[in-house]
Amino acid sequence: MCKSRRKVRVHVLLGDVEFHERLLGVDVELAEQLRGQGCPRPECGGRLHWANFRRKVRGLIGEGRQFDKRLGLCCGRCRRRVLPPTVRFFGRSSYAFVAVLVATATALTSSVVAGTMLVGAAWITIKRWLGFLQCRLATHPEWQASRGRLPAEVSFARMPLALVELFGSAESTEAWLGALRWVAPITTTDLFSSRTTRAG
């Protein structure tokens, strides 16, 4: 199948229905892979069944119907929930993952104010996202486990653009999709301390 190589201005990704459909397709693929492995708990190993739940998402242009539910799984034996990785949602944040990356990339290349205007987030939220991507992500267990497979070192001072550019031009939808797929494993855990005031 021929992959799209079209070039886009970064903010266009917020309302790109075709791109959003591809993100949903990746989430289905990731969830199916996990479902096929069965319950990850060693003492269980039961079959996993669909247990999706509704989500309201912010930061997109348009209705964002591809983001109306988070794919989830539930073990038929131990009944515990298993959360697959996602390229659509930034952990428990109400903002779409692509909105977080677009806003922080815009803050990096232009200004925090420009990032806030694109996705409707408070400036302190954008700064919080930047703090995570440029500092705390480097110590995240999933990042630590997989960073050796990246083709080059990532400059955290230029995150998230530095990661996107490892997969191609920042104007390419493929590069953004590649970056989102790479960081998807972090979305199965809490990204921020519960003691920190939530700002998105």
Image (cartoon, rainbow, N blue to C red):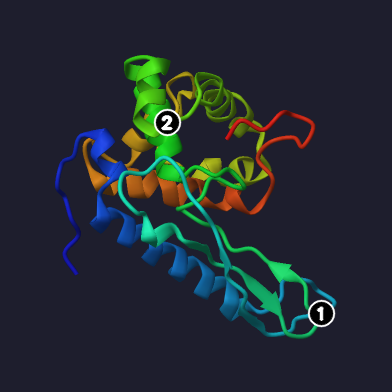
| Residue 111, x across and y down, in percent | 37, 14
**One can see residue 170 in this view:** no
Label total for image:
2
Amino acid bearing label 2:
Gly
When the figure is inspected, residue 195 is found, relative to residue 84, above or below; the finding is above
Drawn side of residue 11 relative to residue 102, left or right: left
Q: Residue at x 51, y 56 (%)?
A: 86
- Give the quadrant of the C terminus: top right
| Residue 101, x across and y down, in percent | 42, 35
| Residue 28, x across and y down, in percent | 45, 69
Of the pair 195 and 64, the residue shown nearer to us:
64
Residue under pointer 1? 78
Q: Quadrant of residue 46?
A: bottom right
Q: What's the CA distance linking mark 1 and mark 2?
A: 41 Å
Amino acid bearing label 1:
Cys
**One can see residue 92 in this view:** yes
Q: Quadrant of residue 10?
A: top left
Residue under pointer 2? 120
Drawn side of residue 50 relative to residue 60, left or right: right
Q: Residue at x 40, y 29 (%)?
A: 103
* Tag 2 secondary structure: loop
